[in-house]
């Protein structure tokens, strides 16, 4: 087996029905002051922003329409909820090969995520019910 392993936790993804309300919650309830401006990712069917924390980020994700991949999640969890955890990896293509070799189900092909770097998702059934995003470490990080 290769020495492939996950790197740092990059962010926790939280699906929300309203990104504006969620930003307000993180500002008012938790005192978060560094929150990025929300932006649309039409290819993924979501609007996202990041709550920047000293050691990580919370990615707030709002569906753009009922066709969004997270629309069903919001239907089942109307108030929103923890959607995924994201770990950095050095090479996304190596990650795909290793995940498949190790028996995991990789959902879809590598694609550009909200940080502008390649991502994949590993099926929750492989990770104790947690949807895991693997993200190639953005250049210039760490």
Image: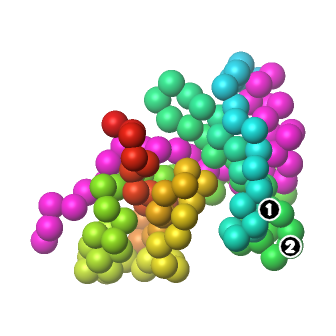
Q: Nearer the viewer, residue 132 or 113?
A: 113
Q: Which residues are magenta?
A: 1-28
Name the quarter where the C terminus is drawn. top left
Any mark on residue 66, and which?
2
Residue 124 versus residue 28 in the image, above or below: below
Q: Nearer the viewer, residue 81 or 140?
A: 140
| Residue located 75% across and 66% down the image | 42
- Name the outermost residue toward the front: 140
| Residue located 56% across and 38% down the image | 57
| Residue located 30% across and 55% down the image | 90
- Secondary element at tag 2: loop
- Secondary element at tag 1: strand
Check residue 27 for magenta coloring: yes
Question: Picture coordinates of residue 126 (x, y %)?
Answer: 41, 71
Check residue 11 for magenta coloring: yes
Question: Picture coordinates of residue 70 (x, y %)?
Answer: 73, 66
Question: Picture coordinates of residue 77 (x, y %)?
Answer: 78, 59
């Amino acid at each position: 087996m290769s020495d492939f392993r996950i790197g740092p936790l990059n962010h926790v993804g939280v699906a929300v029905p309203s990104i504006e309300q969620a930003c307000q919650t993180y500002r008012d309830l938790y005192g978060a002051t560094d929150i990025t401006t929300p932006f649309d990712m039409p290819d993924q069917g979501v609007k996202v922003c990041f709550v920047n924390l000293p050691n990580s980020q919370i990615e707030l994700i709002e569906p753009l329409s009922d066709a969004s991949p997270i629309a069903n999640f919001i239907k089942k969890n109307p108030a929103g909820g923890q959607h995924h955890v994201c770990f950095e990896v050095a090479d996304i293509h190596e990650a795909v090969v290793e995940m498949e070799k190790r028996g995991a189900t990789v959902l879809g092909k590598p694609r550009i995520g909200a940080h502008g770097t390649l991502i994949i998702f590993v099926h929750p059934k492989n990770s104790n019910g947690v949807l895991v995003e693997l993200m190639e470490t953005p250049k210039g990080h760490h």
